[in-house]
Image: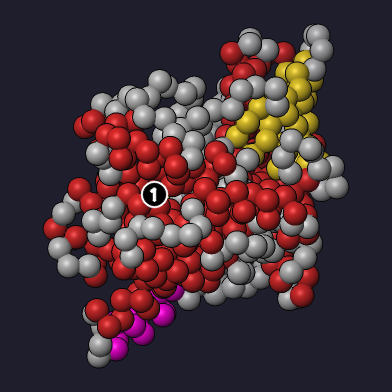
Amino acid sequence: MTLSVFDLFSIGIGPSSSHTVGPMRAAAAFARSLTTERKLDQVVDLGVELHGALAATGRGHGTPGAVLLGLEGAEPERIDPEIAARRPQEIAREGALLLDGRRRIAWDNSQLIFSPRDVRPEHPNAVTFTARLARGEPVTQRWFSIGGGFIHRDGAAPAGHNGAETDIPLPFGTAAELLAHCEREDLSVAEVCWRNELARRPPDQARSDLQRIWSVMDSSIQRGLEATGVLPGGLRVPRRAAAIYARIKACADFGPASAMDRLGVTAMAVNEENAAGGRIVTAPTNGAAGVIPAVLRYALDDLVGLAERPDQVVRFLLTAAAIGSIIKQRASISGAEVGCQGEVGTACAMAAAGLAAVLDGTPAQVENAAEIGMEHHLGMTCDPIGGLVQIPCIERNSMAAVKAVHAARLALLGDGSHRVSLDQAIETMRQTGADMSDKYKETSAGGLAVNVPDC
């Protein structure tokens, strides 16, 4: 299905869309189903099992706490990050949780089982919930966290964050189909996406919601550029963005000459905020959340005239979402499924397309920008040290932001014609992910995760 822009950009908390946001949503959905099916009052015991990659790096990604919060009915879009950091410890001390925010039941952390070697064939990120009832058979549900905060219940039809698919006027599942709409209807990529979005919500609401997405992105930039200290998780990684930004501002050539430095540190700032469990926008994942905000901030601050054109924020985000929707449908945005090429590579492609669009690129040039961004991340592994979204993730976002700008500029210097299509690059990414060893797919069993000591 053609995803909503608000499926690709959703407000949540760090540090991981697949290991924090997705499990919280799945746990909340399970708890909510107990209430809906009128079984909540019969629950006497709970069990949770994490499978595969979700278990392998779950501790470092905050999965246990996210599951507990979800079981209490919390949603990543609304929960206060400070409460999210505190509440799991309170549950452990109290020995009880409030299931679906309604029923107090006993809980011990031993009821959450880690099974990293039990890799489910449907997806590497799986979680099974079991509620034992006072009467009748236990209620068991298995959910998959399939990247970007998307979840899928075993046996159910896939859907976006915004529910079932709506009939839209210009559906597309490939870049070729998207470009065909653009040519036939004489529309930009953003205008195609906008027409589809209007089938889901009124124009004023869609525009307001997109501005809110940008507001949260921009706030995460500002917090990241001001915060200092050490990131949680045990690696003792210092927050560097604030100090680097201060040095950039102190330089005599602060301004256009320092644009690339500011671009890079802005991406780092967002991902440090994510690593700290702060409020961010999944774009399209948490591990890659710094790329798109950094490139959009660069466009507004450093490209002549864009700051005075607020419509460009909407245009950028709609264009980026169109590209992300295709990649999500044709391949994956899950590091546990295809490696970091599916996360940071996708974010780079989306950001490059968005930048090309606000610089008045043709649909063909926009598609070319996205293809360049994707092509030059092919094969990138996901090998976080200590299972934390810190090394190499934070700097990796900085590098991808710079690549996105260069990809857009290369595309705009051409006429949109190119030898490798975006669809071909996406299919290559999918095949590369299928061939990639599991130790390079968010399991912390290979690469930097084993060659660099995590203590």
The stretch drawn in magenta includes residue 33: no
Residue 248 quadrant: bottom left
Residue drawn at x 70%, y 26% as measured from the top left: 154
Residue drawn at x 65%, y 17% as measured from the top left: 34
Residue that badge 1 annotates: 320
Q: Nearer the viewer, residue 3 or 170?
A: 170
Task: Look at the magenta stretch and give its main secondary structure.
Answer: helix
Task: Give the quadrant of the C terminus.
Answer: bottom right
Q: Which residues are magenta?
A: 241-251
Residue drawn at x 19%, y 60% as measured from the top left: 306
Q: Give above or below for 2 relative to 385.
A: above
Residue drawn at x 46%, y 50% as measured from the top left: 283
Left or right relative to 88: residue 246: left
Find residue 183 and report its horizontal and vertical position in percent.
30, 40
Left or right relative to 120: residue 78: left
As drawn, which residue projects farthest toward the right?
117
The stretch drawn in magenta includes residue 242: yes
Find residue 227 and report its horizontal and vertical position in percent.
42, 68
Q: Is residue 415 visible?
A: yes
Find residue 87 and report its horizontal and vertical position in percent.
58, 44
Q: Nearer the viewer, residue 268 or 49?
A: 268
Assign a secondary structure to mark 1. Answer: helix
Q: Give above or below for 220 relative to 402.
A: above
Indicate the amino acid at tag 1: Ala
Left or right relative to 24: residue 186: left
